[in-house]
Amino acid sequence: MRGGKEHRVAYLPDEERVIKDADVHALATESLYDYLTDLLLSNHYFDDDFQILGFYEEGERLHLVISQPYVDGTHPEWEELKAGMVAQDLRDPNPRSLGGNFIIDDDVLGEIDVFDLHVNNVIRDASGWLHPIDAHFYFDDRAAGTAALQKLGLDRVSGPTALASSGLSRSRG
């Protein structure tokens, strides 16, 4: 598979998942914290299933390895992308722009700025549904992003990490 500036990408056909190897220094976000926040928010708003598989160092560079479901489809042209995102309840604040910036009107948080939804970061499946595969969310600062995660209940530990932090043995038996 062809990756972008941020990720090297591989397809795991038996699992119907994509593995992404992200060089942390090449991320389009201001920090690794922001990137991880974007993954949580993508799972929440786009019903994605980003999973963090691990980290490794190559030379002096830190890499993050994640996976997400494989979406079989094609990248839409800009006009179709824009119309599809609007049909999926994202608002286009700049109708004449080609920037890929949209707004989610959230009942809890109000306006959420989503950006980088350009044609290479969205896939149209066979049904015509558009899947953002690399969305970024904007907050004024880290405190605002953290507050948003807290209000949405996304700041809580879950998954295998919850078991590890509970002090319970992984093997019960």
Image: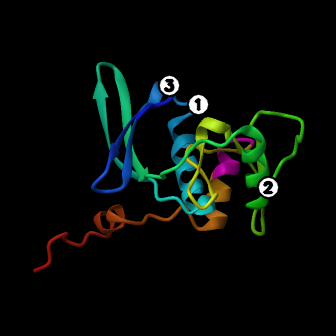
Q: Secondary structure at mark 3?
A: helix
Measured as percent of width and height from the top left, residue 153 is found at 59, 68
Q: Is residue 167 magenta?
A: no
Q: Secondary structure at mark 1?
A: loop
Circle 1 residue: 28
Q: Nearer the viewer, residue 155 or 85?
A: 85
Viewer-nearest of discs 3 and 2: 2
Kindly report the distance in space between the C-alpha atoms of the residues bearing marks 2 and 1: 24 Å
Q: Is residue 108 above or below residue 7?
A: below
Tell me if mark 1 has few (under 14), some (14-19) or many (20+) residues whose alpha carbon lies within 10 angstroms of its own: some
Percent position of residue 21, x then y: 38, 35
Residue 121, disc: none
Mark 3 and mark 2: span between their CA atoms?
A: 30 Å
In the rendered image, residue 159, in percent from the top left (x then y), is placed at 37, 65
Q: Main secondary structure of the magenta part?
A: helix
Question: Which amino acid, mark 2?
Answer: Val
